[in-house]
Structure formats: structure tokens, C-alpha cells
Amino acid sequence: MQQVTLTRDNTLSFDPKAAAPQLSKEQVREIIAKRVAKEFKEGDVVTLGIGLPTAAADYVPADKHIIFQSENGLLGLGKKQSGENPDPHIINAGGGLVEVQEGACFFDSATALTMMRGGHIDATVLGALQVDQEGSIASWMIPEKFVPGMGGSMDLVVGAKRVIVAMEHTSKGSIKIVKKCTLPLTAYREVDLIITERCVFDVTPTGLLLTEINPMFTLEDIKDSVTADFEVSTSVKFMEV
Amino acid sequence: MKRIVSAKEAISQIKDGATIMVGGFLSCGTPDKLIDELVEQNVQKLTMISNDTSIPTADKGKLIVNKQVKKVITTHIGTNPETGRQMNAGELDVELVPMGTLVERIRAKGTGMGGILTPTGVGTVLEENKETINVDGKKFIFERPIGADFALIYGSKVDKYGNVTFHGTTRNMNTIMATAADTVIIQADEIVDAINPDDVVIPGLFIDYIVLNEEAGKCSK
């Protein structure tokens, strides 16, 4: 049984007749990336996972200085290279040719992973196949179907000061925020925050706390689309979308 | 002075069944000409230790496609569908290792240590059948050193003494792999008389053979 605990009275009001909207991939990506970008603080060193998390960099305000780290040996990751003579020797972890920011530096894999595992990264953002109510994450394989490998993600999730999962709320209708992960774990109880296009969950020592809801959705929509138990924060608010 | 040799001569030392380490992150900082020569000489039953298996049409990926590898110890195979296909068909043994664990296992070999203790993988399937050790109340997995018969690595600029410097994100595993193999072969974009000692990243003593990539000047800066 799924337990949803409403602490005191919920102050948000929803239109009970409204149907959950169908969002395009692009809309989902934008909502999540925008929300993720708000998590970064001035001066933070951040490592972004490949795919959706990378889009968060596009929504960081120009006056906020964030330093992006890349596991292939770069601190001070810039935008994609443009121009006629691209340098093939400067890439991001996805293999894309990138520019570097002022103050950037290059280093080897041992130093990159020292930063990641050793507790020197302020925040990491990565996608997931499943996240559970204890903060465990599964993101590197579906046995016999999809086995890309973990790359540096296991080290990063164990070592980063703050672990943010940024992912589509469900995968083709299947539920991803669960009571207990059934897929092989990337890490046990390391996730701090879950951001989807529908809502934001804080992972607390006692379980999930719903802190924000996308105003396009209702509390019922959230309940129906996760199997994890969660509490609704007394200060729950609408996501800015 | 180090031996500056052709790719053919350097690679001819590698026999069937050898264990090789290959530097590079995807194709960046990867000794592609040395790998092309391995493909040319069709050395078989290799065990390959590398960050990834690249894409099917490039460097490390070619060794997989050409079925020269019987086992690969790596961190990520998602960019090469052929690696996954051979694994699922039982043709290729794949050992997936977290990147930080792989690099430290290699470093342990190079530094003469007996292994490493890592928090990475605790509470996951990686902990199964492995020794764990509690240090000050925190659990760590014991991981063994790993070395190879040959390391095939890349350097942007190498001098006649084997000293190496790098440009961009080409260092990746090259620096660590240089310390952990019986024989180290480096592919250089450029060979010079002597690099300023301040700029040396890999000290020359780790390098055995230098191979010049004749085509490098055309694409590198």
C-alpha cells in the first residue's frame, strides 16, 4: 500500500476536473532543466550527467558563476565548439567538442575521479531508471536488455556533496519513483533531491517529502504516478514553469 | 634515449592472448594508429583494459568488431552496440568497473600497492563476492591491482627521452596506464628533442617505445 501523508492542511488548490496534460519531450526537458538550474549556488562546482541533465547548463543565469566539471578531465567546461577549425582534442564526457571557460584546467582520469569520489563536487545532476523512497538510485543497467555500464556515475553519486536526480516522471507510463528499486543499484541511499516535470521531492532521512508540484498537475496525478510513500510538505508550493 | 620505432615494429611484440591497456576517453587521446596496426596484424584473444570500447568504426571499437578481444575490462560499453551484442551472444567476456575504481586499480599496480579500498559500489551488486573492510565506521570494498603486458597510450608531444605533455582532454587514463604495464608504447602527435622539464606530465622513465603519428599534424593544433 502506498502511503501519502498530508501534513496539516495543504494550501494549494487544484481544479479537480482538469486532466493531466500531455507534454512533449521538449516541454518535459525544458521544465526539468529550468528547475534544476535553480539548485545551483554561486561558485558551485557541478558535474552534469549525459542527456537531460546537460540541458540544465543552458538555464543558469549569466550573472551566476557555476563551474562545470567533466569526468574526462576538464574543470571549466564551456559551450559546444563552433567555428571553422574545431579542436578535436577537447571533449566533454559525451564525446562532443567543447569550449573551455576562463580559469579552466585539464587533468587525467585519476584527478577527475578524485574530485568526484573524494567529496570535492558540490552537486551532481543525473538521470535515473528508478529512484526509491530511501534515496537509492538505479541508472546503469536493465539486466539482459540495456547494459551501457556505469562509467563514472557510481563514484560521482557516492562522492558528490549533493545528488540531484533529474528525470522524466515516468518512462512510457511505467513508474520510476518506487518504494524500493528492483534494478541493480548505482548507489544505496545517496540521492538528495528528485526533480521531474511533475514535481520535486526532497529525500529526507525519514522518506520522500513533496515540496513542489507543477501547476499543470494535481496531487492526485502525483499519487497515481509514483508507488513510493511520501509526505506532502507543509510549505508545498507550485513549481515555476 | 628511447627507441623511436614504427607502429608495425612496436605492435609486432604483442602476441595472441596478451593483456593490453589502451588509453583514451572515447576517441580523445586514444592511440588510434597503434590500434590500427593491431587490427592489421590481427592479434587474437586479447584481454583489453580501457575506459570504454569507443564506437564500432573507430580505434578500440575496431578491435571489438574484428573479434580480436576475448575479454574487456571497462567502465562503459554504451557507445558500441557490437560490444553489447557479443556480450549477450556469449562471445565476449565483459567486466564492468566504475571509472574511479578502474583507474585506482591501475594506479595501485603502477605504484606497487596491494590494492585499494573504495566506497564506490557499497550496497550494490559490485559488493557481491568481494571482501569489505570497515574503516572508522565506514564500509569499503577491497579491489585488487590490475596491470597488463602492454600499455598502448597517447601523448600530444613526446621528447627523445620519453617525457610527455598533453593538449586538451587527452590525458585521461594515459598517465596512469603508463605506470602499470611491462611494456609501454606511446603514440605521439609530435616528437621533439626535449620538453621543458616544467611541462612534463609523464616522466620519460615510464615509456619504452615511441611511435610517431605521421598524420597527426594535419588535424591537431
Image (tube, rainbow, N blue to C red):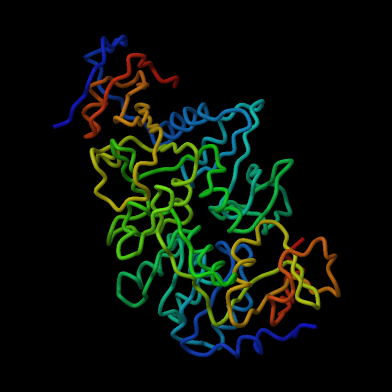
Could you say where residue B166 lies in the image, as x and y percent from the top left?
Answer: 72, 62
Image quarter (top left, top right, bottom left or bottom right) of the N terminus of chain B: bottom right
Q: Quadrant of residue B121?
A: bottom left
Could you say where residue A171 lies in the image, as x and y percent from the top left?
Answer: 30, 41
Q: Residue at x 36, y 37 (%)?
A: A168
Image quarter (top left, top right, bottom left or bottom right) of the C terminus of chain B: bottom right
Q: Is residue B14 above or below residue A186?
A: below
Q: Nearer the viewer, residue A120 or B168?
A: A120
Q: Residue at x 70, y 82 (%)?
A: B209
Q: Is residue B14 above or below residue B217?
A: below
Count of marks overlaid on the render: 0
Q: Nearer the viewer, residue A166 or A88?
A: A166
Which residue ends up furthest to the left in the rendered image? A1
Q: Is residue A226 above or below residue A93?
A: above
Left or right? Give the position of A240 relative to A12: right
Q: Nearer the viewer, residue A123 or A176?
A: A123
Could you say where residue B173 lies in the image, as x and y percent from the top left?
Answer: 59, 64
Q: Residue at x 52, y 90 (%)?
A: B15
Left or right? Give the position of A83 relative to A18: right
Could you say where residue A125 lies in the image, as x and y percent from the top left?
Answer: 47, 39
Q: Residue at x 36, y 59 (%)?
A: B132
